[in-house]
Amino acid sequence: MLNAKLINDLINPGNTKIIPGLERMHKILDILGNPQHKYQVIHITGTNGKGSTAAFLESALVSCGYKVGKFTSPHISKINECITINHKEISDTELETCYFKIKELITVHNIELSPFEFLTTIMFEYFATQAIDWLILEVGMGGLNDATNMVNSKYSIITNVELEHCMWLGNTISEIAIEKSGIIKSGLAIFADNKVEVVEIISNKTSNYINVLSQYKFSIDLDLKSFRTLLNVDDKLYSLSLFGKFQAYNFLCAYAVFKDMGIADKHIKYAAENTMWPYRLMVLEKNPLVVVDATHNSAGAKSLYDSLLGIYNPNDVVVVTSILRDKDIKAMLKYFAKLATSVIYTSIDNNPRGLKASDMVNIGIGIFSNELCIDKPIDAIAKAKQMGKKAIIVTGSLYLLA
């Protein structure tokens, strides 16, 4: 079991100690000899799709024989999930070794790191000790001032830009795009967004970019029997193991990297067909259909709606949901209500930003025809199964799914 002090220092469900800026990261990484420069980096930001894009990249590069580190957040069950090499999580012993080394250094040098900064520092140092070839690096929030933005990445990926974390990133698409484009360095920038302001901001930042939505001729079909995404690009058909139109866009971001690296098509097909990324439009059961999706913002809710619209009559579907209090909850619920006439609101107790079922009812009252309130998620799902619907959609915060 992990050291209790480590857990307290690294797990940050309440966004505590967030102070924008990279001064603290520069200090601690300089002391460590800048481990973040000892491997090649693919840096990924975006409102949605970071994790799926990272997973596609990881699958192909590991298939090619590279030693691949990956950093993603937040974790679902335990913090070790955030730091992996070739799909294998950092062990408790390795995590504690890096933790105590860095804890001593920040104590001696009087550097106060936020939990995410601390975890990011551990990640950079651990991967340096393991001599990885590539680091697939997911931004925590934004980009420009994010703790991960200490690298000179060969590839910078911006999956998409929507309004999110407005308290920290800005209140317009342009402001948020500026923050996210802050990860762009001297390497190739890749993005999947046709918004005029996004294209303008990225093109002003660099001339070395690819917008995959205009770069490639492609078509997307959703296989509703196997729940796979069929993507035809460059006259080649890829059957994506991850379901949803948005997953095709995520794959295209990874595809641009593969093509630039000269990766053989057999490895690209392997990544398309075998990549797993939990809780993103994942089918758990088929009778009735039980789908879980970490739809953590309104853009994600729209993607869920776009992917599942028309599969079932809304009268035959029930949604089980709870959402963090700092999200655009009503906008998300309105998308859910286009898929289902029934909802069961439940509670998130494992995060200080979580809401009780009763809070959710008060926010969503009148949006669905049939509304229930059940505190415990496990009881909410049991009730959903008793309702005799053809489909159950469990969606909202990743903390609910965890």
Image: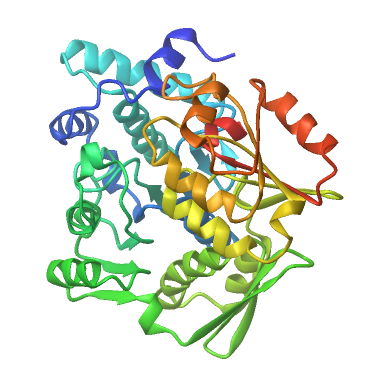
Q: Is residue 154 above or below residue 342?
A: below
Residue 288 visible to the viewer: yes
Q: Is residue 140 above or below residue 40?
A: above
Residue 72 visible to the viewer: no
Q: What residue lies at 46% left-to-right and 19% top-to-bottom?
A: 96
Q: What residue lies at 52% left-to-right and 88% top-to-bottom?
A: 234
| Outermost bottom residue | 235
The quadrant of the image that shows the N terminus is: top right
Q: Nearer the viewer, residue 244 or 142?
A: 244
Q: Is residue 19 above or below residue 294?
A: above
Residue 217 rendering spot, x and y as whole percentages: 46, 87
The quadrant of the image that shows the C terminus is: top right
Quadrant in the rendering for residue 367: top right
Q: What residue lies at 82% left-to-right and 38% top-to-bottom?
A: 387
* Colour setting: rainbow
Query: Seen in the image, is 182 located left or right of residue 304?
Result: left
Q: Nearer the viewer, residue 157 or 337?
A: 337
Q: Nearer the viewer, residue 287 or 1?
A: 287
Residue 286 rendering spot, x and y as whole percentages: 83, 52
Residue 313 rendering spot, x and y as whole percentages: 73, 60
Q: Nearer the viewer, residue 59 or 249?
A: 249
